[in-house]
Image: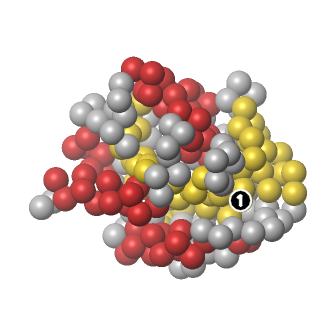
Amino acid sequence: MSEYIKFSCERVAAEITSFEGLAELNAHRRKLRQLGLIGVDPNGIGFGNLSVRDGATDNFYITGSATGGRRELTMADCAKVVACDFERNCVRYEGSALPSSESLSHAAIYKSDVTAGAVIHCHDSKLWAAVLNEAPTTSKAADYGTAEMANEIVQLFTRTDVPKIIAMAGHEAGILTFGKDLEEAFAILMRERKKICP
């Protein structure tokens, strides 16, 4: 397992049988990579991920761990998350790729907002600094990829009307946006970036 994944993983199927949203995911991922919001840092560590809800379920397809440097993803580079247990800090998934280290954060959004159909997690230090504590913000004590972070996200939904952007105080530069689909999640991210860099 990747040293950056902080939850236990249980693979329940070796392959994803279909993922109709892969072309759209790759299209938005290309734009995010061109903007430097997804990629690989100077230490060779991949960052950023996208997910798409599987219909009306809480299951979702997510980019695999350590795929930030890949230009295009195939089904083998994605995982289908079929269950998340925040209490046990466990993710059950299908596919050959390990699910992203932020899978629990994505799951928390899908659990909290039935209208959310897609989530983008990116790194943008300027946007993060601008929206930290202005937008809904998780606790600085909640580290990325943990059940604590997921629970913080769930709590944000109980305390406020979340405007589809979340700053992750315990994950420097970490931003989450979400919407009914990837197009909306991406548009929200671009709108917020335009406010700080018109």
- Is 115 left, or right, of 169 in this rendering? right
For image coordinates 24% across by 33% down, the residue present is 134
Quarter placement of the C terminus: bottom left
Residue 29 spot, x, y in % from top left? 48, 69
Q: Quadrant of residue 6?
A: top right
In this view, the residue farthest toward the left is: 198
The residue depicted at 87 percent of the width and 57 percent of the height is 13
Residue with the most extreme right position: 13
Please give the name of the residue rendered at 67% of the width and 29% of the height, measured from the top-left corner: 86
Q: Is residue 125 visible?
A: yes
Q: Would you say 180 lies left or right of 191 here?
A: right
Location of residue 131 by image quarter? top left
* SS class, disc 1: strand
Pick whichever, 83 or 46, lies toward us.
83
Judged from this view, the residue extending furthest toward the top is 159
Q: Which residue is mark 1?
A: 79
- The three-letter amino acid code for the residue at tag 1 is Ala
Q: How far across and how far down the image is residue 123, in percent?
A: 40, 54
Depicted 96 relative to depicted 131: above or below: below
- Crowding at mark 1 (Cα within 10 Å: few <14, some 14-19, many 20+): many
x and y, in percent, of residue 3 in the image:
68, 49
Q: Is residue 133 above or below residue 91?
A: above
Residue at 32 percent across and 54 percent down: it is 188
Determine if residue 141 is in view. no
